[in-house]
C-alpha cells in the first residue's frame, strides 16, 4: 500500500504518471488519479473503478478492464484502445476523445470544442455530444445512440443537431 507521502508525490509533483500496474492505481484509499500537468497512461489494468482527472496533458488507456471508468480532462486528448467496462463517462473541455475496440454497457462521451471519434465500439447505450466539434461513430453496435453536435458536424445516420 502506498504511504500518504507517496500518494501526495504522485498527485502533486509528478509531471507524467504511468499506471502500468493495478497496484499503483488501486492499492490506495481512492481510485482517483489526478494530473495537473503531464500525461496519464493506464495500461493493462483490471479494476472495479477508475477516475482520472487531467488538467493539462493527455490520457491514454489501453488493454484494460475497468467496471466503472470516468475521465475528466480540461485541455488534453483522451485516447482509449481495448477497454471493457460496464459504465464509461469521458468528458473534455478543449481536447478530443478517440475510442477504438471499446465495449461498455453505458458509454457517455462529451467534448465542448474537440471531436469525438469511435471505431469498433459495442454498447447498449451510447451518448456522444460536442458543442462545436465533430462526432464520428464508425463500426458501432449499440441498442441506443444519442449523438449530437451544437455547431459542429455529426457523422452517423443517428446524429441530430441540437437546438
Image (cartoon, helix red, strand yellow):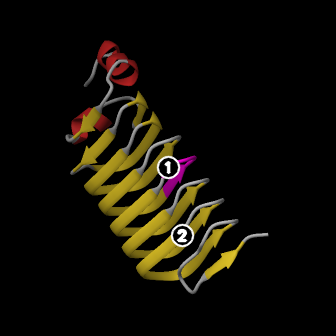
Picture mark count: 2
What residue is rendered at 50% in x and 63% in y?
Answer: 116
Find disc 2 in the rendering and name its residue.
Answer: 135
Q: The C terminus is located in which quarter?
A: bottom right
Instruction: Classify 49 as above or below 122.
Output: above
Q: Residues within 10 Å of mark 2 (few under 14, many from 20)?
A: many
Instruction: Classify 118 as above or below 53.
Output: below
Instruction: Classify 72 as above or below 38.
Output: below
43 or 84, which is in the foreground? Answer: 43
Verify whether residue 91 appears in magenta.
yes
What residue is rendered at 28% in x and 45% in y?
Answer: 42
What residue is rendered at 45% in x and 57% in y?
Answer: 97
1 or 41, which is in the foreground? Answer: 41
Check the image and name the residue furthest to the bottom.
157
Find disc 1 in the rendering and name its residue.
Answer: 95
Q: Residues within 10 Å of mark 1 (few under 14, many from 20)?
A: many
54 or 83, which is in the foreground? Answer: 54
Quadrant in the picture for residue 27: top left
x, y (%) of residue 35?
41, 31
Q: The N terminus is located in which quarter?
A: top left
Left/right placement of residue 100 relative to residue 148 reads left
Quadrant in the picture for residue 30: top left
Quadrant in the picture for residue 102: bottom left
- Helix, strand or loop at mark 2: strand
Verify whether residue 15 appears in magenta.
no
x, y (%) of residue 98?
40, 61
Q: Which residues are magenta?
A: 89-95
Going from N to C along the chain, the mark reached first, 1 or 2, is 1
x, y (%) of residue 157?
57, 87
- Helix, strand or loop at mark 1: loop
Q: Alpha carbon of mark 1 to alpha carbon of mark 2: how far?
A: 13 Å
Left/right placement of residue 110 relative to residue 103 reads right
Amino acid at each position: 500500500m502506498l504511504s500518504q507521502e507517496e500518494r501526495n508525490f504522485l498527485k502533486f509533483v509528478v509531471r507524467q504518471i504511468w499506471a502500468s500496474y493495478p497496484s499503483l492505481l488501486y492499492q490506495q484509499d481512492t481510485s482517483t488519479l489526478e494530473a495537473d500537468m503531464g500525461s496519464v497512461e493506464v495500461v493493462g489494468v483490471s479494476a472495479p473503478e477508475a477516475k482520472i482527472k487531467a488538467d493539462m496533458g493527455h490520457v491514454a488507456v489501453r488493454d484494460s478492464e475497468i467496471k466503472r471508468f470516468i475521465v475528466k480532462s480540461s485541455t488534453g486528448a483522451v485516447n482509449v484502445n481495448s477497454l471493457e467496462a460496464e459504465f464509461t463517462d469521458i468528458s473534455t473541455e478543449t481536447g478530443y476523445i478517440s475510442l477504438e475496440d471499446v465495449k461498455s454497457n453505458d458509454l457517455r462521451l462529451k467534448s465542448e470544442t474537440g471531436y469525438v471519434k469511435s471505431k469498433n465500439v459495442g454498447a447498449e447505450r451510447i451518448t456522444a455530444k460536442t458543442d462545436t466539434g465533430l462526432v464520428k461513430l464508425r463500426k458501432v453496435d449499440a441498442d441506443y445512440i444519442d449523438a449530437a453536435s451544437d455547431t459542429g458536424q455529426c457523422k452517423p445516420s443517428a446524429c441530430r443537431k441540437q437546438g
